[in-house]
Amino acid sequence: MYKNIDNSLAYRAFSGGPLVCIFTKSSKDVPDGMTAAWSCPYDPDVLLLVLDKDHTTSENIRHTKKFVVALPSGDQKKTALELGSVHGRDVGNKLQVKDIKTEKSQKFGLDVMSDALAYFECELQDEELFADKGICLSKVVNVYVKADCWDDKEECFNPGFKRTLHHVTGSTFCSGGELV
Ligand SMILES: Cc1cc2nc3c(=O)[nH]c(=O)nc-3n(C[C@H](O)[C@H](O)[C@H](O)COP(=O)(O)O)c2cc1C
């Protein structure tokens, strides 16, 4: 037996890919980070993100075309909520204000949260699509996975290691099948 729910809740039942945190810097070199629940792969080396056009992150991406997408682990919910709570343009350096522990990304040297399961250094693939619809096709130019989490033979995360967060509602997430 099924039941109808409101069409506007389709995304809640469907849910997105893993929760991601996106790191950029402004034209004035101010670093920023935000959280996004609407993510999925698009091609083997292209990720798809859906970003509100008014976010500081979107403005930074339109300007620099370069950004880092990080996969927070199940125990980084607090960081994800903090990055998703204010606009960079309203607070200056959000990473400093929120006391986010960061390191430099390997290729671009952008500030990225420490201890993520993996991060992907990306370039904006389709400027028009992003400007028009907020669909951010992210061409991966470098992938960095936590060494002890990754199985080189199977080319996937080791069993039990891909403890990503998946947004459910408000500040409730799912990680490893459990609500957190
Ligand atoms: C759990 C969570 C999921 C979010 N998912 C998205 C998303 O998929 N797309 C989006 O545009 N904003 C999303 N947001 C909102 C942004 O992270 C938030 O508005 C952020 O403050 C934007 O920061 P910025 O203006 O510094 O870029 C989400 C926020 C939270 C807390």
Image (cartoon, grey):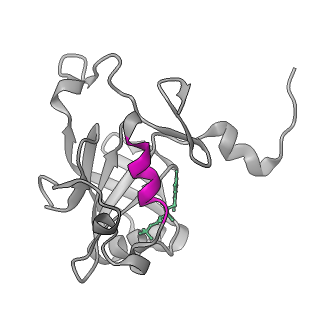
Left or right, 26 with reference to 85 = left
Left or right, 180 with reference to 64 = right
Residue in the foreground of this view, choosing between 126 and 12: 12
Within the image, what quadrant is residue 67 found in?
A: bottom left
Residue depicted at 36% across the width and 27% down the height: 162
Q: Which residues are magenta?
A: 76-85
Give yes or no for residue 29 being in the magenta stretch: no
Farthest residue toward the bottom? Answer: 28
The image shows residue 60 at horizontal and vertical percentages of 34, 74
Residue in the foreground of this view, choosing between 112 and 52: 112
Left or right, 8 with reference to 168 = right
> Is residue 81 shown above or below 92?
above
Quadrant showing the N terminus? top right
Residue in the foreground of this view, choosing between 101 and 141: 101
Residue depicted at 16% across the width and 54% down the height: 105
The image shows residue 77 at horizontal and vertical percentages of 44, 43
> Is residue 134 shown above or below 8?
below
The image shows residue 107 at horizontal and vertical percentages of 12, 56
Can residue 124 be seen? no
> Is residue 87 shown above or below 113?
below
Left or right, 33 with reference to 40 = left
Residue in the foreground of this view, choosing between 88 and 44: 88
Can residue 110 be seen? yes
Within the image, what quadrant is residue 90 found in?
A: bottom left
Residue depicted at 83% across the width and 40% down the height: 5
